[in-house]
Amino acid sequence: QLQLVESGGGLVQPGGSLRLSCAASGFTLDYYGIGWFRQAPGKEREGISCISSNNGRTYYADSVKGRFTLSRDNAKNTVYLQMSSMKPEDTAVYYCAADPVLFRRCVLSNPHEYEFWGQGTQVTVSS
C-alpha cells in the first residue's frame, strides 16, 4: 500500500523554525516528483516547494523562497521541509504529495497533478 505520512507540525513563534518530514512507504520516492503544499482556512491549496527526482532540482514559491528548504534522505525514503523565519501567514495544514509522472519535472501550480497525498500536518505560527 502506497502511503505518505507527514510529521513535525506544531506551534511556533514568528521568526522561529520547524522541520516537516514526509515518509513514504510502499514505494520509493527516488522515482517520483514530490511536492509540498499548504492550505490555510478558506484558501486554495498552495504549492510551496517541489523536487524533480531525476536531477534533484528543487523549486520554491515566491512566498517561501529563501526561508524554506526542501531536502531528501533516500536511505530513509523521506523528504523534509525545513522552515525558517516563519511568519503568521505560514499558518496552514501542510501536505506532501508524490507522482511518478512528475519524476522529471515537478510542479507547484496544480495540486491535481499529484496522485498520492499524505494526511497533512498542522503548522501554526503565533506568539
Image: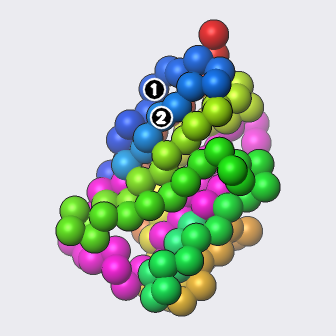
Q: Position of residue 54 (x, y in %)?
A: 46, 88
Crowding near the residue tagged with mark 1, few <14, some 14–19, many ≥20 C-alpha atoms within 10 Å: some
Residue found farthest to the top: 127
Of pointers 1 and 2, the one earlier in the residue sequence:
1
Q: Position of residue 114 (x, y in %)?
A: 54, 72
Q: CA distance from mark 1 to mark 2?
A: 8 Å
State the residue at coordinates (53%, 72%): 51
Q: Is residue 97 visible?
A: yes
What is the quadrant of residue 86 in the picture? top right
Instruction: Name the amino acid type tagged 2.
Output: Leu
For residue 111, side relative to residue 56 (left or right): right
Please name the residue that numbered disc 1 is placed on.
10
The residue nearer to you, when weighing 1 against 122, is 122
Image quadrant occupied by the N terminus? bottom left
Does the magenta segment cover residue 63? no
State the residue at coordinates (55%, 41%): 83
Does the magenta segment cover residue 27? yes
Please name the residue that numbered disc 2 is placed on.
18
Residue 116 higher or lower than 94, as above or below? below
- The residue range painted magenta reads 22-49
Disc 1 and disc 2 in contact, CB within 8 angstroms: yes
Label drawn at residue 73 = none
